[in-house]
Each structure stands twice: as C-alpha cells, then as structure tokens.
Image: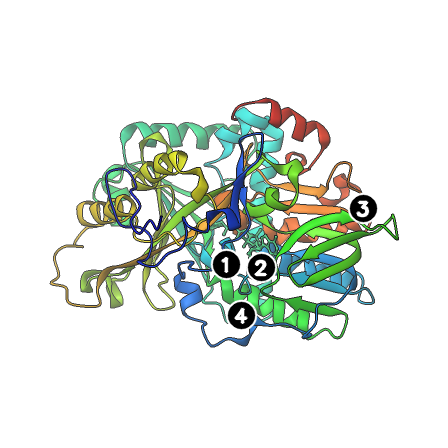
C-alpha cells in the first residue's frame, strides 16, 4: 500500500508524491517489545532544509576519506552532526596520535543540526522555573550558566576562526503574548534573580505598549531582551569537520555508512566491533553522537531518548519587513500552554525569516504523531498545514504592517521541512560513559536546544574520556548518564 497523503489532524498532504516512507517504514523505524518506537535515520526521500539546499555542490556531503572502510580505529564516532564533529575535534586535539573514524548514515550533517531553525540562544531565565521544579535551584542555575558559556564558546570559535556561517550576534527577544504568560514570565524572572541568577544583561520591559513598539508584535505584553545568536548550522559544522580532516591521516570520515550494531569483539574482549552495512570496524572506544536515533543502536536508551519530528518554515518577508524595515532581532514568542514561535530573521544574511518552535500547529502535529509512531524518524515530512497555518495567522495578525504591502511570486510562505529532535525523558542530555558498557560513550538527547549545549557538552565528554572526574568538567550534574538516572526515568511514565 503506497500512502501518498498523510493526514495531520484534519489536513491532508504531507509526504512527497512518490514517498516510500510508509512502504519502507521497517527499514528505519520499529518498536521494541517495550512499546517504545525508535529508528535509524531514513536514507531516502528526506525533506531538504534551507541549510542543506544551499550547499548541494559541497563535496563534504558525500565525503569518504578512504574508498574502503577502515577495519580498525582507536575510536569510532557515530554521527556527524555538531556533536560527533565537535567530539572528533577535541579527540584529535587530546590524542593526535590516535585514529578516529566518524560514521554518518547519510549526507554529512543531515540530522537535526543540518535541519534546525538556526538559533544559538542561551536560556538566561525562562527555563529556570521548569528546571528548578525538576532538579532544584542549584542545578537549574548550572544549566542556565552552562548555556551562557556554550553560547560564548561558540561565538568565540566562529569569530576566532572567521567561520563563514552567517553568524549574527544581537539581542534575542522573548515576548509573552497574554497577560497570564507575561505574569508567569515576570514571576520566573524574579525567582531566578532572587536565587542569585545573573540578570544585569537582560533588558526587561513590562509595559505592553512599549513591548509592542520594541518587538513590532501588536499584542506583545512584555519583552525580555538579551544577547544571543543565529547562524547557518551546517556551515559551522562543515568548517569544524574540514579542520578535522586537515589534521592528517589518523582521521577518517565515512558518509553513507550506517552503524547497525555495536558488539564485543570475539578476539579482543576489551574491544568493540561496530557493524555497518559496509563492513565492521574494531575499536577501543565508541562514541554515540546519534542524538534522536541513539536508542536504535543502543537498546538501554530505549524510552529515554525519543525521536520526534519537528517543523521549520521558510518565509520570504513582504516589503514592509525587508531592507531597512527587516526584523533586527531573533525571537521567542511565548503563547499560552507552553506554545512558542521561534523567529530567525537572518538580518545580517539574506533576510529570509525562519519560523520554528513548538507553535500551536506543532502541538496539533504532535497529536497526529502520537497516533502515527511509525513516523517518528521520518524527516521526509513537509508542508504540515497546521504548522504553516499557525505561522501565517501569527504573521498576519501580529506583525505590525505585515499585510500592508502587496506581494508577488517568490514571497511569503515558501516551504517547510522536518528534522528529528532527540527528546530525552527529563529534558536534558545524556553525557558520559554508558553504564555497564566500558568504552562506549554517549552525548545525546539534546531536545530542541542542542546549539546552546553541545559546544560545551562535546569537549566535556572528551575530557571524561581522558579520565577527568565529572566535577572537574563543569557540566551540570543532571546531564550525567548514570544507571540510577536511567532506571529512575524508565520507571516513570513521563517527566
Ligand atoms: C526542526 C528543528 C529545529 C531546531 N531548532 C533549533 C534551534 O534553533 N536551536 C537549537 O539550539 N536547537 C535546535 N534544534 C535542535 C538541534 O538541532 C539539535 O539539538 C542538535 O543539532 C543535535 O546535534 P547532534 O549532533 O547531537 O545530532 P544530529 O545533528 O541529529 O546528528 C546525529 C547524526 O547521527 C547520524 N546517525 C544516527 N544514527 C546513525 C547510525 N546508526 N549510523 C550512522 N549515523 C547515524 C544522523 O544521520 C545524524 O547526522 C532543532 C531541531 C530540529 C529538528
């Protein structure tokens, strides 16, 4: 049975005409006896993100350093997103003499990193309430401090290395859209401040008229502004990977090579064998940088990291939001029930506006996904009507002057793509050595927020691999993968 149109809520029309997504579903997604769905990366028919569309002639996409897969490496890193690429960078710096192979199931960096909404936005107050409730004030503070450091490290790297990746640095605006959300935001902000959180870099506007004028959003109720960035994530990751490749013969990238299983070596009991479609690699250490797909390869992560499709919309703004009138900030538009639009206006690049986040349409899409768990790793999804409609209504009803200009072909709601978020059960990543599997390491489960986490989590993982204690590495304790955390989370239905 070929399913050409899939319904999301009440709407029809998601997959491309010839999508084999449903026909070949077993190829990449399956459920275990525990009922948790997971899957390998889909290898055909994926949607192309705006980032991936723009680099079609880049030879890194299908790079293989050697024609044949090496049969041995000191370390095999599985996944070439920002995590795998950065782990490789720091591994090469720590042990230039050790050999590293990076395996990527599809094109280079074609997972969440190559498909995200382009924000590196350190949470500087908003998540405090949620994290405090879940982990206590001290850990909540550490998470927010870590995000700030991550952003600073990323910006420093891009500036020092002069990376061509459309980096923008400026004020991001969080804009509550109802009085209730504004009150809640003010409350969380105050709690964070009282707990000792650093807030002197955050400009707070609680007057709705002033907030509307700053944000250009008609019904804005408040506005919180602080420094953050947007960037082209594929180009940043590609720059780091090219630098890895320039380091010499000990480094090998193999795209279009899916790892299917990691087993103990029968000959050398202290070694692992990574089985791929193209042969096996024996190694001392394995790094799972597979994010959303982690549980497909490592069963102990089943139910702990859940692959979840997410959408991003590309919009070419009308003339009232172009040129000198282009939006000059990135945004988090805060709606009731935790819904959110992220807006990335790429104001120092091409001015194309990307709408992402868990907008009200994405929430409906999530309901549909709950009924279609076999689509959990399906990034062929595109044009989800509810998500695009929510973007349209927001832009038309709330952005001051959006509908005033006549528009022609090539403008407005152009296209949307999907990517697979690795949702961890408690909302924070798993970092460290996998319990009971000495030599196997993980840095995954970054949710929709990896760009504000991985630039510290990946080097942190390499320091742990080098034998440093968790406490020395400086990551929030709640990111640590422990047997206790895994068992505790498996025992609860949802956090
Ligand atoms: C639509 C969308 C919007 C987002 N927007 C933002 C944002 O604006 N800001 C932000 O901070 N975060 C955002 N995120 C989340 C962010 O992109 C991720 O947290 C981050 O990119 C994770 O990086 P990663 O390298 O760990 O994972 P990935 O980039 O997913 O990399 C994992 C790689 O592993 C490969 N792989 C998996 N299994 C195997 C296997 N068995 N064998 C070989 N290769 C394998 C995959 O193909 C993939 O390339 C968004 C995510 C999505 C989907």
> Helix, strand, or loop for circle 3?
loop
Q: Residues within 10 Å of mark 1 (few under 14, many from 20)?
A: some
Say which of marks 4 and 3 sits in front. Answer: 4
Instruction: Give the mark nearest the N terminus, 1 or 4.
Output: 1
Q: First in sequence: mark 4 or mark 3?
A: 4
Relative to the observer, which residue lies in front, 136 or 43?
43
**Spatial separation of the CA atoms under disc 4 and disc 3:** 34 Å
Question: What residue is shown at x 45% (from left), y 67% (from top)?
Answer: 166
Q: Does the residue tagged 1 have its C-beta within 8 Å of any atom of ligand 1?
A: no
Is the Cβ of the residue at disc 1 closer than 8 Å to that at disc 2?
yes
Left or right, residue 181 beside residue 55? left
Kindly indicate the quadrant of the structure image that contains residue 19: bottom left
Q: Determine contact: label 4, label 3, CB under 8 Å.
A: no
The residue that mark 1 highlights is 43
Q: Which residue is mark 2?
A: 105
Instruction: Mark 1 or mark 2: name the one nearer the start of the chain.
Output: 1
User: Nearer the N terminus, badge 3 or badge 1?
Assistant: 1
Q: Residues within 10 Å of mark 3 (few under 14, many from 20)?
A: few
Which of pointers 1 and 4 indicates the residue nearer the eye? 1
Q: Secondary structure at mark 1?
A: loop
Mark 2 or 4, nearer chain start: 4
């Amino acid at each position: 049975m070929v399913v050409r149109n899939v319904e999301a809520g009440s709407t029809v029309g998601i997959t491309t005409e010839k999508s084999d997504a449903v026909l070949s579903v077993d190829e990449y997604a399956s459920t275990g006896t525990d009922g948790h769905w997971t899957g390998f990366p889909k290898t055909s028919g994926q949607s192309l993100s705006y980032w991936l569309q723009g680099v079609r002639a880049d030879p890194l996409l299908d790079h293989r350093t050697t024609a044949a897969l090496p049969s041995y490496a000191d370390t095999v890193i599985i996944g070439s997103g920002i995590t795998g690429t950065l782990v490789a960078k720091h591994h090469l710096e720590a042990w230039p003499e050790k050999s590293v192979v990076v395996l990527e199931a599809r094109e280079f960096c074609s997972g969440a990193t190559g498909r995200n909404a382009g924000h590196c936005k350190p949470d500087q107050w908003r998540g405090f309430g949620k994290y405090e409730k879940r982990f206590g004030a001290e850990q909540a503070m550490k998470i927010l401090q870590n995000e700030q450091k991550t952003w600073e490290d990323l910006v420093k790297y891009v500036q020092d290395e002069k990376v061509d990746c459309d980096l923008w640095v400026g004020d991001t605006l969080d804009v509550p859209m109802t009085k209730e959300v504004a009150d809640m935001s003010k409350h969380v902000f105050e709690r964070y401040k009282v707990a000792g959180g650093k807030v002197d870099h955050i400009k707070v506007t609680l007057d709705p008229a002033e907030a509307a004028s700053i944000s250009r959003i008609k019904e804005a109720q408040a506005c919180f502004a602080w420094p953050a960035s947007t960037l082209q994530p594929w180009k940043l990751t590609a720059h780091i990977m090219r630098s890895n490749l320039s380091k010499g013969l000990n480094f090998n990238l193999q795209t279009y090579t899916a790892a299917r299983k990691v087993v103990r070596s029968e000959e050398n009991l202290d070694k692992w064998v990574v089985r791929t479609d193209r042969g096996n690699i024996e190694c001392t250490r394995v790094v799972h940088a597979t994010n959303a797909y982690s549980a497909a390869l490592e069963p102990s992560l089943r139910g702990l990291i859940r692959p979840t499709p997410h959408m991003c919309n590309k919009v070419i703004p009308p003339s009232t939001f172009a040129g000198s009138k282009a939006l000059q900030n990135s945004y988090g538009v805060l709606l009731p029930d935790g819904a959110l639009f992220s807006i990335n206006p790429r104001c120092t690049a091409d001015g194309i506006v990307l709408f992402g986040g868990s907008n009200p349409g994405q929430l409906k899409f999530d309901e549909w996904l709950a009924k279609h768990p076999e689509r959990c790793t399906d990034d062929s999804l595109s044009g989800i009507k509810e998500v695009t409609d929510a973007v349209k209504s927001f832009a038309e009803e709330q952005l001051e002057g959006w509908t005033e200009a006549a528009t022609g072909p090539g403008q407005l709601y152009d296209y949307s793509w999907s990517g697979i978020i690795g949702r961890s059960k408690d909302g924070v990543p798993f970092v460290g050595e996998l319990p009971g599997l000495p030599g196997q390491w993980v840095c995954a489960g970054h949710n929709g927020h990896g760009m504000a986490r991985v630039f510290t989590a990946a080097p942190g993982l390499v320091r742990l691999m080098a034998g440093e204690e968790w406490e020395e590495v400086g990551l929030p304790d709640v990111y640590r993968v422990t047997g206790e955390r895994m068992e505790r989370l498996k025992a609860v239905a949802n956090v």
